Structures are given as C-alpha cells and as structure tokens.
Image (tube, rainbow, N blue to C red):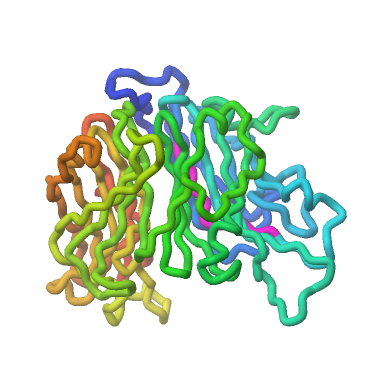
Amino acid sequence: MAASVVPAVRGQGDPGSYDTCDQSAVLFQAFSRDDPGISYELQPRSDPDIAIGGCHLVAISNFGIKGFAKSSQAGSLSRRLTKQPMGSLQDVLWSPPTTQQPPYPVYFFSRSFDPRVIYDSATSRFWATSLVFERYDDVVPPGTTLFTPRQYSVGLAVSKDGDPNPTTSDLGWRVYRVDVTAAIADLGGTTSRIDNPSIAVDSDYLYYQFGSTSDYWHLGRLDKAALMNGTAPAVISVQPGDVNFFRVFDTWAKVAVRYGPDDGHAQYIVNDGFEALGGASGDTLRLYALRRDTTSATLATFTLQVPEYFSAATAPQPAPPPPGQAVPVGTDNGKIMALPVYRNGHLWVTHTVRHAGGGGRAFVRWYKVQMNGWPQSGQQPTSPAQWGEIEVPSDWSAYFPSIAVDSLNNAAITFNVSGTDKFISMWQA
C-alpha cells in the first residue's frame, strides 16, 4: 500500500482547505509475516482495506490493524482483531466479552474477518468494523468442527481523535461489539452465516450493514455521539423487532460511504438488480434509503433503470488464469461489492459485470446517479447522469473495482486486471 502524495482535502467542500502536517511521499508495507503479535494461522486471505485521514492513515486486514503517520514509515498501532486461544489479550482490538475472560472453556474460538475502515472528515475520526464469530463451550461438542459459531457480532471501533495511534496507557480507540445473534436467529438459527460488512456515518448516526447466507442483507444504525464519547454500552445487543435494525430479502447490498458536508438527506444503500436471487442478468439497480426526517426509522425503495448487464459468474472463464495458474480467477457475479460513495448529491457505484459482446470476459462498470434529495424531496433519482465500462485488452479481464470521489466530483476507480499471459495487477482509471 502506498501513501498519497497529494495533500488530503478536509472534506468540507473547500478544495483549498488542507491539513498542514508533513505529507511527503512514503512507500510502506502495512503488514508482514514478521510482524510481532500478528497471527496468520487461521486466516486464509487478507481482505485488506485502507482509510486516509488528515495526517494519518489506517490499514486493516484479517491479520490486524495498524495506524501510520503520513510523514513516517512506522506503524505504531499493531493489533490483532480478535482473541485466539493461545494469544494474549494485550494485542487484541475486539477482545472477548467480559463474561468470557480467562480461564477459557475447553472449546473456544474467536475469529474476525472482512474488516473495513473509513475516515470521517467532519469529526476527524477513523471508524473500523469487522465481523466476529465466537463459540465458548465447557466441552468440545460432539461432531463440531472448527468455526461452528454460537455467537455473531459486528465489531465497531472509533479513534478518539485524528491520530489512530495509542500511547502506552491508552488504546486510542473506543471499541464496541454489536451482538446480532438474536436478531438473525429466526433466519435459520445461529448457523445462518453473516458476511461482508460495511459502515458509513453522517452527522447523527453510524450505519452498519452485512449480508447473510439466508439471502437477506441487514442494516442497523447507532447514535454516533454515544459511540464517540464512550457512553454507548461496550456490548450492544440487537433483538428481533429493534426499530433501528432492518433486514431485506434481496441478493446483495452495500451502504454508501458519505463524504463532504452532510446535506441531511437519507442514508443510501445500493443493491444489484438481478431479477431473481442468483439471476444471470439485470437492467436495474435497487436503491434503498433510510430516512432521517421521520420520528421512526423507515426504509424507502426505488428501482433505477440502467443498461443491461450480465453476471460475470456465468462466463466459462470469468477472468482467465494468470500465468502458471490452472484455475480461472473467480470474479463478482454482478454483486455490489465495493462501497458506493455519496457526495454532492450524487451516488457513485461500481461493480464487475459481463456484457453480451464481451466474449465472456469480466468488465468494470460504474454509474453516477443524481439523487435529487430522494425520498425527502418527493423527487425520484435520475437515470445515471454518467456511466461506463472499463475495457482492457481483448485477452484480459478487469474486475474487483473500488471507487472514490473528491470534493470537485472527480472520480477514481482502482481494479484488478489479469489474463492468460498477465499476472494479477492493479490498475486505475
């Protein structure tokens, strides 16, 4: 991962407002197998993410979390995300609940995965999340294999200020767990696996969202001020029927990250537009809005027409194998995997698709949607003001995009490219 060499805009809509810290160009390695205290044994992949703040940045992966100063290569915060049976509690971000402190039961595990981190320029805070699976038993349950959870949580953390690095006496973050076990229990029991979380903030709330193997996605909101000042409970239990917790029977979704001044509009969620669960094609995006102008939280829905797209997963080789690799690289099947961005009244979305003339290859598609203050304004979102597909040479595929937007409405997309004669590499547009 490389630090930005451009001074970071504070995010308040003024392109000339910059932080005054030293932001010299620094190339650094966020994580290494030689890192002390970072465990790799139970993580088959890294799932990395990064957030850029005023004078600092935070890198997070399944292996742990680190904070960096933009002027330095050293990362002084190095913590695993969850406790493992033989590890210390001193280097853990989301440590086990107080009811499960040492000595631990005979059968115990706590595993964190799919982490995300964002930066909120309005408050100069970093926000991090990860899903946490846990189980505690006095004996090893008969027939139980590793990672048979009994408890599901969404880990949340917010830095106490713009510097995410701790001192010797202070972690530097406020840390929470949102226990959603009861809230998803009626979706097929606690074996209903949750997956792929995302978070966003506005002036009032933190929004957390995740999917499940029961073909539901879930959205909750929490009071932002209480999380920042530490008055929220360390473990927040979500019960069925909670007015601030929603579940939607649909294919896949992501909550939009908000940048720039808060315009008071709803929090937006974007869903792919396949006509049926697991469908092969679609010509819509489904937009959801969690309204903020009502006394009780309500979800509004809108179906947005877009040019037809096809599931990349239906192609014989959605992404050709890199040199020396026999199995093709799996790509998204049109799902919204990257966090959408809401800024200056527009919603920016990107995903991996396959189109009819593409020869079975994966392409990156993006949209810019004018939201028109929907739903509070009574107007509906407008068909994409801009959209496009990023095509690479004919024997290569493009996939796994991510999008960012600055205060002047300039968008940047990063994505992977590979082919039979090309190793996986990262490109930008």
* Viewer-side residue, 309 vs 9: 309
How many dots with numbers? 0
Q: Quick check: 232 above or below 145?
A: above
Q: Quick check: 187 above or below 62?
A: below
The residue drawn where x is 65% and y is 44% is 235
Predominant secondary structure, magenta span:
strand
Image position, residue 343 (x, y; %): 27, 36
Q: Is residue 241 left or right of residue 133?
A: left
Q: Quick check: 177 above or below 133?
A: above
* Viewer-side residue, 419 vs 95: 95
Q: Is residue 43 visible?
A: yes
The residue drawn where x is 31% and y is 62% is 399
Image position, residue 372 (x, y; %): 17, 38
Q: Residue furthest right?
A: 103
The residue drawn where x is 25% and y is 43% is 347
Q: Quick check: 256 above or below 410?
A: below
Q: Is residue 116 left or right of residue 335?
A: right
The region drawn magenta spans: 110-120
Q: Is residue 148 left or right of residue 105?
A: left
Q: Is residue 378 magenta?
A: no
Quadrant location of residue 145? Answer: bottom right
The residue drawn where x is 72% and y is 53% is 83
Q: Is residue 420 visible?
A: no
Image position, residue 271 (x, y; %): 31, 57
Quadrant location of residue 285? Answer: bottom left
Image position, residue 105 (x, y; %): 83, 62
